[in-house]
Amino acid sequence: MTAEQQRHQQQLAFAASGAELEIGSAADCPLPLEQLVITDADSPWVRQHFSAGLTAEVYRIEAGDRHWTLKRARQRCKVQNVDGQTSFLNELQHRADIQRLKAGPGGFERFAALVDTQYASYRRGVLLSPWIAGKPVQDWTERRLLQLFDCLRALLLEGLFEWDLCPGNILDDGRIRLFDFGYMYRFDPLRHFNSNGTATPQFHGAERFETRHYFAHLMTLERQSETRALAALRLEKQITLDTYRQLQMDLAQRGASPVVLDWLAAICAGWQRALQGDLEDLYLEEAWRSHWLDLHDDLGGQTCTPLTLARIDWLESALHQRQADLRRLQVLETPGAGEDFREQLRLARQQASTWQVGG
Ligand SMILES: Nc1ncnc2c1ncn2[C@@H]1O[C@H](COP(=O)(O)OP(=O)(O)O)[C@@H](O)[C@H]1O
Ligand SMILES: [Mg+2]
């Protein structure tokens, strides 16, 4: 059984068991729990309602002189797979881990980017956090990238792998904040690459950010100028390279296996080589990978948006204009797959148009 199947089995069993998972105490809620569980868009304490959420209803509420975020689990999740359907339970499990880490030595500082959990109950379907008065990140400055990767490195060291670093899951209120852990899974950082064990080495912390987020941002920059997009990739790569070198040292000190250390060393060596040159090949390679993977993520969950279509545009145009480079970089591995990719993208466009979710 794969690590993923094992997780699904355990989480589905937990869901069926009737057992409760609670974080904090209902007495710490700024409103009586009975009121929180019946909250809807018309409740007098609601200031804002985020209806775009796929797994939960999210409300900004005002209570006890401050603002909070209340996440209420949906009866039926809109994501069409087990990961989506267990994501509320999953989020609570890892919120519990995060609260423990924050309470440990130096934890408050090291995990400052992760939102606190004021109270949560799986059976009552509520999750309450302080409201973050921030904005989504439009401009990835050095400070923001450093804060994000500091946080990711700390999480990876503790064996927590965050898969969904999409634009809707990162805010900045003077510092970078993460608050949505529906797709955060545990793994053994000394032996495994991510929560799939050693089966999928292509997925790692920097890759997740690039795939879910950064290359969509770079796609916007490309429209202004390719030089700006390349400069933004250079900035990010310098920071990811430093981050991974530090991570590798920390993991080595903790006795990580050669499999993990060599894998990180190879990733670093590739980035280092690219940083010494003009970065154009790395850009093409990673942009293709990011758009391709994220497209399939959206298709897999049947959760497509206008961004999904923009990614298809990018892939089609790369296939048209940069086919020779893509082949030289072995991005299009299968022989004669050129036509195949075109056909796959045509199909993907059809599906992505059908599976647009409310935004
Ligand atoms: N603690 C918070 N502070 C401010 N905004 C938040 C907070 N939690 C969620 N949000 C807002 O609500 C949206 C949906 O919440 P999120 O936890 O990402 O749920 P989902 O699982 O539906 O993606 C976020 O994109 C963000 O805009
Ligand atoms: Mg989210």
Image (spheres, helix red, strand yellow):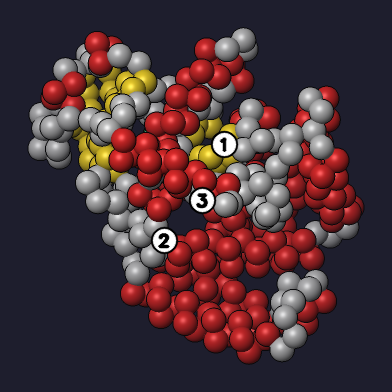
Q: Which picture quadrant has residue 341?
A: bottom right
* Residue 172 visible here: no
Q: Is residue 350 above or below residue 142?
A: below
Choose the circle earlier in sequence order: 1 or 2. 1
**Residues at discs 2 and 3 in contact (Cβ within 8 Å):** no
Looking at the rendered structure, the kind of residue marked 3 is Gln
Q: Is residue 155 above or below residue 201?
A: above
Looking at the rendered structure, the kind of residue marked 2 is Gly
| C-alpha span from label 2 to label 3 | 17 Å
Task: Decide if residue 281 is on the left or right side of residue 287.
Answer: right
Task: Decide if residue 79 is on the left or right side of residue 151.
Answer: left
- Determine which residue is flagged by label 3: 5
* Residue 12 visible here: yes
Choose the circle earlier in sequence order: 1 or 3. 3
- Determine which residue is flagged by label 2: 301
* x then y, percent, for residue 193: 70, 45
Q: Nearer the viewer, mark 1 or mark 2?
A: 1
- Determine which residue is flagged by label 1: 186
* x then y, percent, for residue 120: 32, 25
Q: Residue at x 44, y 40 (%)?
A: 10
Q: Nearer the viewer, residue 136 or 178?
A: 178
Q: Residue at x 40, y 53 (%)?
A: 82
From the Cβ of disc 2, is ligand 1 less than 8 Å away?
Answer: no
